[in-house]
Image (cartoon, grey):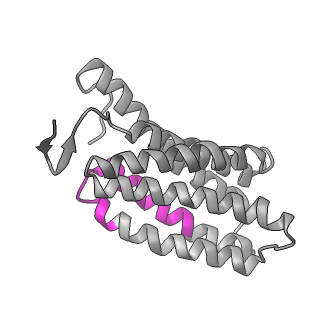
Amino acid sequence: MKIEESGVLKEWWSNPAVVGLMGFALTTMATGLSIMGFWGAGPTLCLALAFGGTAQFIAGVIDLRKGNIFGGSAFMSYGAFWWAVFLKDVVLPLMGVKTSPAGNAGFALMWFLFTFAFMIASFKIGKLLATLFVLLWIAFGLLILLPLGMIPAKPVGVEVFVTGLVAWYIAMAEVVNTLYGRTVLPVA
C-alpha cells in the first residue's frame, strides 16, 4: 500500500537517508583527515568502495523508488562519485593510467558544477541540508585548487572534514529523532 505524503511515496521501505548520509559523512570525514595528513588514502578508499559508494548508491535506489527525486538522485550520484574516486585512484593506476594534477582539478570541477545544482535545490528542503550542500560546493571548489598547488592542503582537509561532520549530524539526528518519535536533535 502506498500513500502520497509531501511528494514522497510511503511504503514498507523505511527511510534510506541515514545509510546514505552516513556513507557520505564517514567517507568525506576520512577524506578530510587524509588531506590534512593524519593518514594515507587507505581509509578513504575502503570507505569509498564499500560505504560511500555502494551503500550510498543503494540508499539512492531506495529513495528514488520511494519517489524522492532529490535524495535518490543525490545518494546515487555521490555514491557513483566515490566509486569514481576508487577507480581513478586505485584501478586506473594499476592499468598504467595516472591522473594528472590538471585531471584531478577537472574531476573536482565536474563535481563542483554538479553540486551547484543540488545546492540551489537544497534551499527548498531545509537550512541544515542547505548548509551541507553549500559546504560541499565549497569543498569541491577547494579541491579544484588543491592539485594545482594554489591552496595548502590543511585548510582544504578541515573544510572537507567539517562537510562530512555536518552530514554525520543530519544522519544522527534522523536516527535519534525517529527512534524517540520526537525532535531530540534539531535538523531544520
* Image x and y of residue 60, in percent: 41, 50
Which of the 4 quarters of the picture holds residue 50?
A: top right
* Image x and y of residue 45, in percent: 71, 50
Which of the 4 quarters of the picture holds residue 157?
A: bottom right
Which of the 4 quarters of the picture holds residue 144?
A: bottom right
Q: Residue furthest front?
A: 1
At 43% from the left edge and 44% from the top edge, which residue is drawn? 59
> Is residue 122 placed above or below 9 in the rendered structure?
below
In the image, taking residue 33 as reference, residue 93 lies left or right, namely right
- Specify start and end residues of the magenta stretch as a single range: 120-140
Q: Nearer the viewer, residue 13 or 153?
A: 13
At 45% from the left edge and 71% from the top edge, which residue is drawn? 114
* Image x and y of residue 179, in percent: 32, 20
At 56% from the left edge and 47% from the top edge, which residue is drawn? 54
In the image, taking residue 164 as reference, residue 69 lies left or right, namely left
Residue 121 lies in the magenta stretch: yes
At 55% from the left edge and 71% from the top edge, which residue is drawn? 141
Residue 118 lies in the magenta stretch: no
Q: Nearer the viewer, residue 27 or 88?
A: 88
User: If the image is split into quadrants, where does the N terminus sit?
Assistant: top left
Q: Nearer the viewer, residue 16 or 145?
A: 16
Q: Nearer the viewer, residue 183 or 6?
A: 6
In the image, taking residue 38 as reference, residue 157 lies left or right, namely left
User: If the image is split into quadrants, where does the C terminus sit?
Assistant: top left
